Image (cartoon, grey):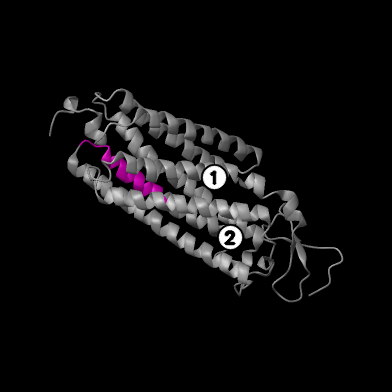
Amino acid sequence: MSDVSDRDQKFFFHYTPVEGLSYLFIVLFGLAAIIHTYLGFRFRRRYLVWSAAICGYMEVIGWIGRLLAAVNPDSSSLIPYLLNSLFTLFAPTLLLAANFMLLRDIMQRLGACYSRLNPRIYGKVFVTCDAVSLFIQCSGGGLSAVQNQNTVKIGGDISLVGIVFQLFGLLVYILLGIEYFYRYFKDVPLKNKPAEMYYRADFTPRVRWLTLSVASMTLLIFIRSVYRAIELAGGYDGKVAATQWLFVVFDAVMIALAIWVLIFLHPGWLLIESEAQNVAVRPRYSGEQSAAYDPNADSSYSLKPLKGQERV
């Protein structure tokens, strides 16, 4: 093995990062992170601060690493490569957590009785899976930082397990989401749910746009995860990992699009309180009154009778 001082950035990256692209994505992710921080506090959706905003800040750190490698390609420092490889690997996991919480919000708005899982625990289940995936990836990333070929390979394999686990959780999430909307549009609620979960709200234009946001983000993150799985399966010195445009297109562009889609189609704009209060819902069990969904109630599924409604 050659001495560390004899190595340059091309040795670590297997190519010289493009300086212009580094500046571009630092600006894109940095601006997105700042906007998400502001919107998260403004609309009292703080989970988007610790998920989407932090994802953006982590991507900035990763791309600063690439910028350092681009402006000083002869440097033998491992730090630029580690900043890039670790932070761009971990960051999208947080954005995926935001996606899970958004689908939960949509389910609570449209009708909980169509969901296989109780939406109250929906976010918790998948965010926990996401956290496990992140822990596995961090463990692998830590081992990959050690300058030993055997340890680097083991670290890459562990990170691959984390990505595959994330992909599995994402697939389950997608299937449950598809089932939910199938049941909603066909009006086929699940049986044996708590009585307060049997309501149905209209699929308003705003909710439609938010659903499009979640679907788009899911597709973009899924494409990125497949790319990362293929990259890690081939090893850090494999052909995929050594091809710069693949990383830019299937990692950076996918996550940049996803994080900006969430800005333009933000739940703060789309899940407005006044619309929720005006949406009429109907019970899916006998002997209960028609109701209006009250987003300010203590329970996520409180039913508030409408004046003048007859019993079903």
Q: Name the residue located 61 percent from the left edge and 44 percent from the top edge.
A: 45
Residue 137 is inside the magenta segment:
yes
What x and y, as percent, mark residue 116? 55, 67
Residue sitting nearer the eye, 124 or 294:
294
Please, what secondary structure does the residue beneath circle 1 have?
helix
Q: Say which residue appears at 27% left-offset and 51% top-offset.
A: 233
| Residue type beneath disc 1 | Val
Q: What amino acid is labelled 2 in the image?
A: Pro
Could you say where residue 26 lies in the image, as x and y percent from the top left?
Answer: 44, 31
Report x, y in % for residue 220. 45, 50
The span shown in magenta is 132-147
**Which residue position holds label 2?**
119
Prevalent SS, magenta region: helix
Is residue 74 something that shows in the picture? yes
Categorize mark 1 by other alpha carbons within 10 Å: few (<14), some (14-19), many (20+). some
Can residue 133 be seen by looking at this rendering?
Answer: no
Q: In which quarter of the image is the N terminus?
A: top left
Mark toward the start of the polypeptide (1 vs 2): 2
Q: Specify the label residue 261 is tagged with.
A: 1
Query: Residue drawn 61% across and 38% down?
Result: 39
Compared to 291, does 236 lie above or below? above
| Viewer-nearest residue: 303 or 181 | 181
Name the residue nearer the viewer: 212 or 292: 212
